[in-house]
Every structure is written in structure tokens, then in C-alpha cells.
């Protein structure tokens, strides 16, 4: 089963060593200015309130909240914290809480995704019992240029990605290029039978939270651009996807700053 984001088949790969680019230092400096103005506790509180927007965007991008009056009512309820009237929000919010916990703990050295964490997030996001297993069959690609792994190569390819992203080269990257590399390469592998885009989108917030930034998200209106930028990343051009993630970080920081 594919997510709602419509994509096309193909094959390709990603570069092994993208270079850091973009306003990473400026974003970190801006975060520190906001923390000094709001105080650490208030900054953290404001960051948590943005989880509802990351959950909302995940639901909309993956077709779980199609445009309708009922969806708008559920979004309002979610933003108000009324999850009894917004049941669709429960799974992505639970996944984001788990990612916040992982990003702020000593597990995986706090900044690094792991295969067990990915399986756990997939299970939470899809309502499965227990950590999800990797797919045992081939699926249709969602993105043009994706070289989806045959089932027998998923552990190797995903392991290589996680080893690289957790190594010195990966850790030397700023938040946006590191998240962009993971996002595209994860979708290139697509280790689960469904909800790969859902997991990839939720994981954007993991990389932000691991670097003490607010949760981030793409919006439904971004879908055409995301399709193009992910496909370009498969062809060794991660710059546009990195720039989109940087804009998401800037937007989240602006939202946090409004709390002052």
C-alpha cells in the first residue's frame, strides 16, 4: 500500500557524501536568541505545541485527512488538544512523542536514528502491535527514480544508511542536509510494505529535535515540490530538498518566537 502522495516508478541512487550547505549556523544562532528571550522552559513548551502541526501535516500529506468540513473540525479539535474529537491525531502525536524521547535521551547517542526506532515509529504511526518488520515482498515505487531495495537487501542498505548518518561525516552535517539525506535515501530503500513516506516525514522532526530545534513538517501544498526534489536527490542533487527543510526550520522557529 502506498501513501496518498502520488509518485512514479524508476531507479537510481544517492551520493554517499553530500556536503553541508545552507544557513545552518544562522538557524542555530536564531534558536539561541529565541531561547535567551523566552527562557529554556518556555522554548521547550512552545516546541511541544508545534507537534500538533507536524501531526496535522503528516495526516494531510498521506491522505488521512482529506479536504472536508469534518477534517477541518478535526484539525481544530486537535489544535485545541481535544483528541477525543480528533482521533486521527493520536497515532502521529504518539510517534512524535516517542521521537522526542529518543532525540533527548542517551539511546542512539541522542542524535542518531536506529533500525529498532524506525520499526517502532512505523508501528505507532500505523497502529500495528509491536515493532514493524521490514517488508518481505517487492512494492511499487512511490517516487520517480527510486531504486527500491529487494527484500533481501533491505537490512544491508538501511544499515549502511544508518551507519553513515551516525558516523562522523553524517554528524558533521547541519540539521537540514542531514535530514534531507536520510529522507531521500530512506524513501529510496522503502523498507516497509506501507507508510514509508509517513515514517520519513515524521523522522524530519527527529533530526530537528536531536539538534534542539522545534518539530518540522511539510504541508500538503508542498507535495508537487517534494516529488520533484526527492527525485532530484536520487540523482545526486540534495540541494533543493535541503533548502525546503531549512525553510521548514525557519517557519517553526518563527512560530516558537511568537510565544514571547
Image: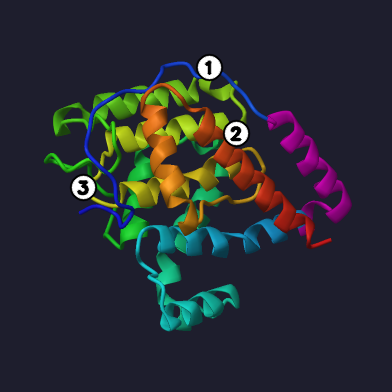
Image position of 244 with respect to 259: above or below: above
Q: Give the residue at x 66% y 52%.
A: 252
Which residue is tagged 2?
Answer: 175
Mark 2 or mark 3: which comes first in sequence? 2
**Mark 2, other Cα within 10 Å: few <14 / some 14–19 / many ≥20:** many
Quadrant, the N terminus:
bottom left
Image position of 46 with respect to 26: above or below: below
The image quadrant of residue 182 is top left
Quadrant, the C terminus:
bottom right
- The residue range painted magenta reads 23-42
Asked if disc 2 and disc 3 are in contact, CB closer than 8 Å, the reply is no
Please tell me the numbered disc located at residue 169: 1
Mark 3 or mark 1: which comes first in sequence? 1
Which residue is tagged 3?
Answer: 193
Asked if disc 2 and disc 1 are in contact, CB closer than 8 Å, the reply is no
Q: Position of residue 222 (x, y in %)?
A: 48, 51
Q: Position of residue 159 (x, y in %)?
A: 33, 26
| Residue 105 visible in image | no
Q: Position of residue 250 (x, y in %)?
A: 68, 45
Cα separation, mark 3 vs mark 1, equals: 30 Å
Amino acid at each position: 500500500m502506498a501513501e496518498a502522495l502520488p509518485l512514479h516508478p524508476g531507479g537510481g541512487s544517492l551520493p554517499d557524501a553530500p556536503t553541508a550547505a545552507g544557513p545552518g549556523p544562522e538557524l542555530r544562532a536564531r534558536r539561541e536568541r529565541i531561547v535567551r528571550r523566552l527562557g529554556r522552559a518556555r522554548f521547550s513548551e512552545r516546541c511541544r505545541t508545534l507537534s500538533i502541526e507536524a501531526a496535522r501535516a503528516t495526516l494531510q500529506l498521506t491522505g488521512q485527512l482529506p479536504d472536508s468540513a469534518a477534517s477541518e473540525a478535526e484539525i481544530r479539535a486537535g489544535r485545541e488538544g481535544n483528541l477525543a474529537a480528533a482521533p486521527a491525531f493520536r497515532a502521529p502525536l504518539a510517534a512524535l512523542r516517542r521521537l522526542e524521547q529518543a532525540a533527548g535521551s542517551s539511546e542512539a547517542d541522542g542524535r542518531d536514528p536506529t533500525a529498532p526506532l524506525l520499526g517502532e515509529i512505523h508501528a505507532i504511526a500505523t497502529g500495528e502491535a509491536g515493532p514493524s518488520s521490514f517488508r518481505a515482498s517487492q512494492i511499487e515505487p512511490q517516487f520517480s527514480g527510486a531504486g527500491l531495495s529487494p527484500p533481501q537487501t533491505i537490512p544491508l542498505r538501511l544499515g549502511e544508511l544508518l551507519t553513515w548518518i551516525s558516523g562522523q561525516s553524517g554528524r558533521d552535517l547541519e540539521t537540514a542536509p542531514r535530514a534531507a539525506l536520510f529522507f531521500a535515501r530512506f524513501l529510496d530503500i522503502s523498507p516497509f510494505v506501507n507508510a514509508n513516506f509517513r515514517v520519513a516525514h515524521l523522522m524530519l522532526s527527529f533530526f530537528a529535535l536531536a539538534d534542539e530545534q522545534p518539530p518540522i513538517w511539510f504541508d500538503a501544498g508542498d507535495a508537487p515540490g517534494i516529488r520533484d526534489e526527492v527525485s532530484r536527490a536520487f540523482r545526486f542533487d540534495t540541494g533543493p530538498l535541503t533548502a525546503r527543510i531549512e525553510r521548514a526550520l525557519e517557519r517553526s522557529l518563527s512560530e516558537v518566537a511568537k510565544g514571547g
